[in-house]
Image (cartoon, helix red, strand yellow):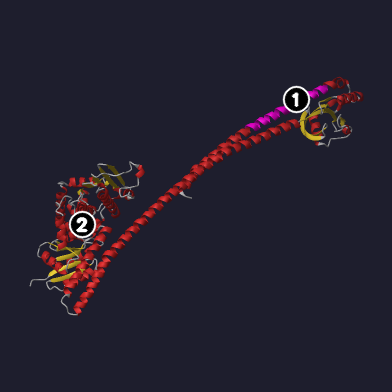
Amino acid sequence: MSLPIKVLLIDDHPLVLEGIRSVLETYDHIEVVGAEASAKEGLVKSQKTMPDVVLMDINMPDMNGIDAIELFKEHLPGTKLLMLSMHDSREYISTSTMYGASGYVLKDVSTSEIVTAIETVAAGGTFFSTGVSEALMGAQKEPGANSLLTTREQAVLLLVAEGKSNKAVAIDLDISIRTVETHRKNIKKKLGISTTAGLTRFAIANGLLGA
Amino acid sequence: MTFRQQILALTTIPLLLAIMAITSLVTWQSSQLSKDGIQTFEQSMLNAKEAELKNYIELALTAIKPVYENAGPNDQFAKEQVKDILNRLSFGEDGYFYVYHYDGTNVVHPRQPFRVGENWADHPDVAALLNYAKNGGGFHRYIWEKPSSSEVSDKIGYAVGLDKWQWMIGTGAYIDDIVAQTEAANQSLSNTVNQTFLLVALITVPAVLAVFGTGVIMNLRERRLADTKLKELTQRIVNTQEEERSRIARELHDGISQNMVGVRYVLDLAERQVREGKDTALATIERGAGALNTAIKEVRRISHDLRPGQLDDLGLSAALESLISNFEERTNIDVDFESVAFKNVLPSDAKTAIYRVAQEALSNIERHSAAENVKLQLKSTNAGLEMIIIDNGRGFVTKQNPKHKTVGPSGGLGLRNMQERMEHFNGSLNVISTPKGTRLVARLPRSIYLTSSPQTAELQGA
C-alpha cells in the first residue's frame, strides 16, 4: 500500500472534531496529522505537516471556512480543501467551489461517505455528498450572473484602486506577486474591466472608496 | 432642568428683563418729568407769594411815609402815629404787619398783642428776620402759628429795616395752601407711577404666564405623545419577541424534541437487541441514525430561519440570492435579481436590516400582490446602498391614503417596521403602490459603510 493520506481537521466544535478524528483513525490509509479549532491555527499547523487534504468547517468564529480556502490556496497550493458543513444551501456550495474547494460534504452524512470524499479529493477529483449534489441540481442557474469577487479579490481590488503597486499589495497581504497578478486577472475578468484606472473608477462609483 | 426647560427659560428671561427695563425707564422718566413740573409750579407759586409780600410792605411803607420821613430819630409822637397806622393796617384773614426793634423787642403785633414790649431776640426766626432787615431786607421761610385757626403752618416772612428808628417792619404770608397743593401733586404722581406699574404688571404677567403655560403644555403633550409611542413600541417589541419565542418553543418541542425521544427509544431497542444477540440491531441503529438526521435538518432549518448564516459567511448578495431561490421554489413567482460584485461593505446589523426588509417585502408580495414577476436590484453608489424591489401585482394602500398610513399589507406593521429599520441607520424607505404594481426603495447612506472590510484586515493578519 502507498503512503497514507495526511488529513488535517479544522472545526470549532470539539465534539465533532473528536468524533471525526476517532472514526478516521480506524482507517489505515488515513493519517490525521492535526485537529485544530480555528482556521488560523489550522494554517499554521498545515505549514508544518503539509497535509494532503484539509477537512474544514464553514461556520467558525474569527474567520469562516470559506475565506480560509483562499489562504490555504495561496500558501499551500497542493493541498486539497474539503468543506464539512451543516449548510446545504446552494450559495454555500457554489461559493466554496468558486473559492477553490475540491469538495463539499454535509455534516449529517455517514462517516464512510466522508472517507470516500477524502479519498476522492486526495486523488485529484471533486466530491459532493448526496444532499449537496441535489441542491446543485435543483437550480441550474447560469453561473456568473451575479459573479461575486472573492474576499481576497475584493481586498486586492481596494488596494489596487488606492493606487498600490502589485509589490505593495503583495507585501500588504503577505502573498507572492504572482498571486496578486492572478487575483488582478480574475478581478478584471469578473468585472469586465481592462485597466487599473477602470478599477479605481469602479471602486469609487460603487462607494467602496471614499471619493 | 431639561433641555426644553432651558430653552424656555432662555427665551422668557430676556423677555422679562426687557419688559422690566422698559417699564422702569418709562416710569422713571415720567416721574422725573412730573417732579420737575411740580417743583416749577411750587417755585412760581412761592415767587408770586414773595412778590405779593413785597407789595404789601411797599404799601405799608407808603402808608407810614408822610409821618416817618418828617420825624426825627427819637420822635415819640411820630412813632406812636406809625404804630397806630400799622396796627390798623391788615390784609386778608391772616395778613398783618409787625414791628420789632433791632434789639429784638416787639413794637407792633396787631394779632398777638402779648408779644408787644417783650424781647424776642432769642427766637431764631425773629433773629433771622432781624438779620435780613438790617441788611436791606429779605425773605425767610419758617413755621408760625396761624392767628385765624391757631394752627402751626408754613409761612414766608419779609422784613425791611427802618434804620432811622432802629426798627424792622415785616409781614408774612401762610403758604400752607402751596404746600398742600404740592403734596397733592406729589401724591397723585406716586399714584400714577403705581398705576403704571400695575398696568404693566397686568399686561406682562399674564403674557409671560401664557408663554410659560403654552410651553409647559406643549412640553407635556409632546412628552405624553412620546411616552405613548414608546409604550406602543415596547409593547410591540415584547409581543413580537413573545410570538417568536413561542413559535421556536413549539418547533423545538413538537419537532426536534419528539424526534429525539424517538431516537432514544430506537437506541434502547438496539441495546436490547444487541444483548439478546439479534442481528436486527444493525437495522435498528441505522433507523436511529436516520431519525437523528431528520432532527439535524430540523435544527438547521430553524437556525437558518432565525438568522441566515449566509449574511455573515457569504455576504448580503449571497443571502439574498438564497432567499430569492427559496422564494421562487415556494411561490413560482419569477425573480430577476441584480446585485453587486462585492460584499461586506455594510456593518452586520445594516446587512441584517436590508435582508429583513427584502424578506418582508417578498413575503408581502407572496401573500397579497398576486404578482407574476419581481425585480430585485441591489446597487451601491457614492451616495450609499439602494435596494429596489418592483413587482407587477395589484398593489395596496400606502401613504397616499393617509387614513391607512400604518396599516401595511400584512394588516399590521410590516411597512412601518421596514421603515424603522432603515431610519435607524439614517436611511429611508419609499413605497409607491398602484393597482399595476408596487415599487419599494430602501436606502442606506454611504456614511455607514465600513471603511476597510474587517474581513480584509483579518486576512492581512493571517
Q: Position of residue A80 (x, y in %)?
A: 14, 63
Q: Position of residue B142 (x, y in %)?
A: 77, 34
Front one among B275 and B130 = B275
Tell me the amino acid under the disc marked 2: Leu
Q: Main secondary structure of the magenta part?
A: helix
Label for residue A173?
2
Q: Is residue B345 above or below residue B289?
A: above
Which mark is in front, 1 or 2?
2
Residue B163: tell me if it is visible: yes
B60 inside magenta stretch: yes
Q: Quadrant of residue B50?
A: top right
Front one among A122 and B454 = A122
Q: Describe residue B9's horizontal placement relative to residue B400 as left or right.
A: right
Mark 2, Cα crowd under 10 Å, few <14 / some 14-19 / many 20+, is some
Magenta stretch: give its range: B33-61
Q: Describe residue B85's horizontal placement relative to residue B158 as left or right.
A: right
Q: Residue at x 41, y 53 (%)?
A: B231
Q: Residue at x 30, y 62 (%)?
A: B250
Q: Is residue B28 above or below residue B272?
A: above
Rendered-image quadrant of the C terminus of chain A: top left
A197 inside magenta stretch: no
Q: Element at badge 1? A: helix
Label for residue B51?
1
Q: Quadrant of residue A94?
A: bottom left
Q: Element at badge 2? A: helix
Q: Chain of mark 2?
A: A
Q: Describe residue A195's horizontal placement relative to residue A13 as left or right.
A: left
Residue most toward the right? Answer: B77
Rendered-image quadrant of the N terminus of chain A: bottom left
Q: Position of residue B200 (x, y in %)?
A: 58, 37
